[in-house]
Amino acid sequence: MALNFEQPLSDLTKRIDELTKLNEDPKVNFNSEIAALKKEAQTMRGNLYSKLSAWDTVQVARHPDRPLIRNYIKDMFSDFIELHGDRCFGDDHGIIGGFATLGGKRLMLIGHQKGNSLESNIASNFGMASPEGYRKALRLMKLAEKYNLPVVCLIDTPGAYPGMEAEARGQAEAIAKNLTEMATLEVPIIVVVTGEGGSGGALGIGVGDAVLMLANSVYSVISPEGCASILWRDGKKAPEAAEALKITADSLLELGIVDKIIPEPTGGAHYDHSATMKEVKKAILKQLEKFNKISTRKLIEKRFNKYAEIGKFRKG
Amino acid sequence: MGWFKKSKKNAVQSDAKPELWSVCPACKAHIYKEEWEANIKVCPECAFNDKLSYKERLQLLIDEGSFKELNKEIKPTDHLKFVDAKGPYSEKANAAITKTGMNESIITGTGNINNIPVVIAVMDFRFLGGSLGSGTGDKILRAAEYALKHKRPYIIVSASGGARMHEGIVSLMQMAKTCAGIAKLNKAKIPYISILTHPTTGGVSASFAMVGDINIAEPGTMIGFAGRRVIEETIKQKLPDDFQTAEYLLKHGFIDKIVKRNEMKNFLSNVLQYTTAK
Ligand SMILES: [Zn+2]
């Protein structure tokens, strides 16, 4: 699937494919033409991705081919043992989790689950979790605390599910409780925004000692479309809202919300999963190593100070 | 019969001096201003609890002359240099300061409730819809730290539409920041009582307002995470009339008690007898 801003690149790729097909005929030789076009495509890809607007970045962050938690589980983590249920009401599929191993380190993995097809998206509610999802996440975090395992949370959600049942069963309470409990959880929490960081639904598993963001992911208090329809009274002004909300990794690093940006391959994470995962793995392992050395008391104190600093009032 | 009442009221309204009347935002009944104020803005017709200013709320809950404000100087900060269709956020914030005489959407301080010393924070919906700005979050956290240091019960009266979009992600993070403050109180066994007043929605409902040791709401208070319209558009079905009311939350187990406005102060001091028992 080509995004709007990728259209010229997509046209070029199509020409390369056509030419490659023609080239199968032994009577012709387009090798040099194909090589030239491939080089041009690579340059174009670099150019396009070097100047993404905030709104372009939203499209990349939502790209259906972007690595999803199931991809990370399969190709980056090993020995995953999924754990189910919140022990209260049900098993949400908008958030999944369980024991996982990364580079030999055992940990508790928790993350939003989006799908890559209509079917899988319906099954996981498009990555929008219900209260059961947040409660399952908290249960797993408490388990991690008991077994002294670090927690890794992968964030990728449009937001918490806005449904009648979700409200009736306490969406607000479930998120609020997680924020409160995560503040003092006695094991390291590493958060990685891998795609879409949608508001309270993202933050509900997003309080951590280190918050990392993939370069083309976004994190926002409200979707650009939602903000545009409220503050611009026009949903079509989403590109303007995206710009104003400062939701890209660069802006969030500058604002002190994010600790590190994880680079993506040219062309975005969806263009090269394995290169993306190599970087994500490296970044997580580095943080785990850093926080493993810190005493529990210091860890919690540091985490508290990190959040106390965000938006701390300063005169003038 | 409701119809008689209404028609009578409309007749009164047509030749009445508007300055003598208050209009109930819920049922549109016209009530004598004097009666409206004497009834602490609770509608005698439909029992709706209208929004109170922070001054009215403090007067209602705190012993006369005992309130001392903390961190009054904290104001909104324009972290994003945010400009929307209506102009810069900084101008909007300044207009709110002028309009309300407050510096942020919350007032924090110390005071007594029937002679029991507490730390109290009161949100005021008039200030940018009671939204959770960084100044708001900072004041909530600092008041929590004060309560911790002085071992006083902490009471927050919420009234908020949720996060403050104009402060973007910094506003969202105030949810985590305020809850971190509450977590500290929990570890130190300092009581925290949350009073949810109309409306308490969005990011405020999904943070400090919902994690009280005891959650109390006023009758008819709207409490919820997602907006009613968004939910209706998502699930394409009509929601029950009492959806996201205090009564609905009580029924579903998220509120300990619904307390009438004129009984709130005594209820609080009764509860505090247990939380500070020796
Ligand atoms: Zn009324």
Image (cartoon, grey):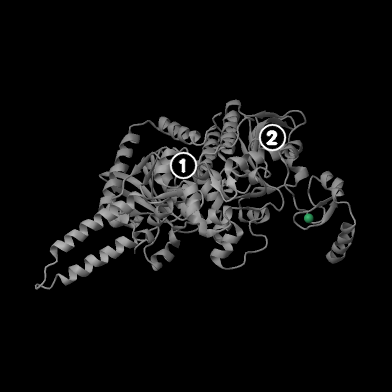
Badge 2 element: helix
Work out whether B143 lies above or below B207.
above
* Kind of residue at disc 2: Gln
* Kind of residue at disc 1: Met
Q: CA distance from mark 2 to mark 1?
A: 30 Å
Coordinates of residue A89 in the picture (x, y in percent): 50, 58
The tag on residue B273 is: 2
Work out whether B201 lies above or below B94.
below
Coordinates of residue A109 in the picture (x, y in percent): 36, 49
Residue B119 visible: no
Badge 1 element: helix
Residue drawn at x 41%, y 48% as measured from the top left: A140
Residue drawn at x 73%, y 28% as measured from the top left: B66
2 or 1: mark nearer the eye: 1
Chain letter behind tag 2: B
Chain letter behind tag 1: A
Q: Quadrant of ligand 1?
A: bottom right
The C terminus of chain A, quarter of image: top right
Q: Nearer the viewer, residue A149 or A179?
A: A179
Q: Which residue is mark 1?
A: A182
The N terminus of chain A, quarter of image: bottom left
